[in-house]
């Protein structure tokens, strides 16, 4: 019996992500929360002949504080794609002013109603919204760092697709064989290509021009979609797939399945609170508090992090990219942390 709640379920990501979750046979309850159209999306999905019981939750007014609590009650997993997407010319950081308070308020409710749930944050800027969530939960005295994740899987999905094109492989065959670490915006995104022998052998033959173009495309893939959608939003369908892929990793860990991937997907996590996170951060990451690394999961929580410096042969070019990422991330993290410190709740 697993209950998954999607907050922002009627949005561009929320709808296809909820569809994918409805198709998953291990989900028994699917709770769809949004400030608009949640009931409509729930009615629609509820006609699909799979076991998950779907319920919509939509506040009746701005003062309605109960509906979200009902939606979250008993959740094992809460996925949050609530908030505004970018328009051309905006950075993800430009979304902070609107999305930070949306994430803060949802997470306050999680802290009250289902503090043991595994929380997956999609809302941008992920580099800052995850620290927002962590600070809220810390202040409430219910923070479990092993259960809070910023969803960065789309960067890995893009890296698989773009690298496969360059080295002539089937993109699906690269799943679990390359890794993307760091954060989720521009230069904080660091693809590592030296993960599995046959991938690294082929990748090592890339010209410098192709390698640089690959890095640039993974780091700025989101901009490609924002530009193509021309004011109507950002990645939704590829993100729904990516969000589902990470949720599936969590669901599998809840049902005790073992992963056969050489590297599991990465997620943006709070390093000081994780078994080997503190160590990796102190030794290799300039004591950064949040960083996306491949996560081994058990029972919906981080069991251990894959240390890329031990096992993924980080090259000197990749080390330089990591150093640039660390500088950007420090600022993004500080912004999220100080926002909550000055919030009253
Ligand atoms: N992590 C990633 O890789 C990634 C990828 C793509 C998009 N995103 C981010 O995901 C977010 C959502 O993108 P989208 O394209 O689905 O946007 P969207 O505007 O289509 O959908 C957002 C939904 O959130 C809802 N919402 C707003 N405030 C809410 C609240 N307080 N409680 C519950 N629901 C609320 C809206 O009603 C809407 O239905 C954006 O911030 C976007 O930047 C992240
Ligand atoms: O680019 C965006 O704003 C959305 C998302 O973070 C993405 O990577 O596609």
Image (tube, grey):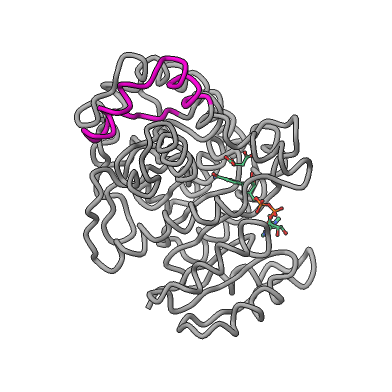
Principal secondary structure, stretch drawn in magenta: helix
At 40% from the left edge and 62% from the top edge, which residue is drawn? 116
Residue 282 lies in the magenta-colored region? no
Number of numbered discs visible in the structure rendering: 0
In this rendering, would 49 be left or right of 44?
left
Residue 202 lies in the magenta-colored region? yes
Q: In the rendered image, which quarter is residue 10 located in?
A: bottom right
Q: Position of residue 246 (x, y in %)?
A: 42, 54
Q: Position of residue 217 (x, y in %)?
A: 53, 29
Q: Residue furthest front?
A: 168
At 20% from the left edge and 31% from the top edge, which residue is drawn? 311
Q: Position of residue 230 (x, y in %)?
A: 77, 40
At 73% from the left edge and 44% from the top edge, which residue is drawn? 229
Q: Which residues are magenta?
A: 190-216
Q: Out of 5 and 140, give the one closest to the viewer.
A: 5
In this rendering, would 39 be left or right of 23?
right
Q: In the rendered image, which quarter is residue 3 located in?
A: bottom left
Ligand 2 rendered quadrant: top right
At 72% from the left edge and 46% from the top edge, which residue is drawn? 233
Q: Position of residue 173 (x, y in %)?
A: 33, 47
Q: Quadrant of the N terminus?
A: bottom left
Q: Out of 282 and 32, give the one closest to the viewer.
A: 32
């Amino acid at each position: 019996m697993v209950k998954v709640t999607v907050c922002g379920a009627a949005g561009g990501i929320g709808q296809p992500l909820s569809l994918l979750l409805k198709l998953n046979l291990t989900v028994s309850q699917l709770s769809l929360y949004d400030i608009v159209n949640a009931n409509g999306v729930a009615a629609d999905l509820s006609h699909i002949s799979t076991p998950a019981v779907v319920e919509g939750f939509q506040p009746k007014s701005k003062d309605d504080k109960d509906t979200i609590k009902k939606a979250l009650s008993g959740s094992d997993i809460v996925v949050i794609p609530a908030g505004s997407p970018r328009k051309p010319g905006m950075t993800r950081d430009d979304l902070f002013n609107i999305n930070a308070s949306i994430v803060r308020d949802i997470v306050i409710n999680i802290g009250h109603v289902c503090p043991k749930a595994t929380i997956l944050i999609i809302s941008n800027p992920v580099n800052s919204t995850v620290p927002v969530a962590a600070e809220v939960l810390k202040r409430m005295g219910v923070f479990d760092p092993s259960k809070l994740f910023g969803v960065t899987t789309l960067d890995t999905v893009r890296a698989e697709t773009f690298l496969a094109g360059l080295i002539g492989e089937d993109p699906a065959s690269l799943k679990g064989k390359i890794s993307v670490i760091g954060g989720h915006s521009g230069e904080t995104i660091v693809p590592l290509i030296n993960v599995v022998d046959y991938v690294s052998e082929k990748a090592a033959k890339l010209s410098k021009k192709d390698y640089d173009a690959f890095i640039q495309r993974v780091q700025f893939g989101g901009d490609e979609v924002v530009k193509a959608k021309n004011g109507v939003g950002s990645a939704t369908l590829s993100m729904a797939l990516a969000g589902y892929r990470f949720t599936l990793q969590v669901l599998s860990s809840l049902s005790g399945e073992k992963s056969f991937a050489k590297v599991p997907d990465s997620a943006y996590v709070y390093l000081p609170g994780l078994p080997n996170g503190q160590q990796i951060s102190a030794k290799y990451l300039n004591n950064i508090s949040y960083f996306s690394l491949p996560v081994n999961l058990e029972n919906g929580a981080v069991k251990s992090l894959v240390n890329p410096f031990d096992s993924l042969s980080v090259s000197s070019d990749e080390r330089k990219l990591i150093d640039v990422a660390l500088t950007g991330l420090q600022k993004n993290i500080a912004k999220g942390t100080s926002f909550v410190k000055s919030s009253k709740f």
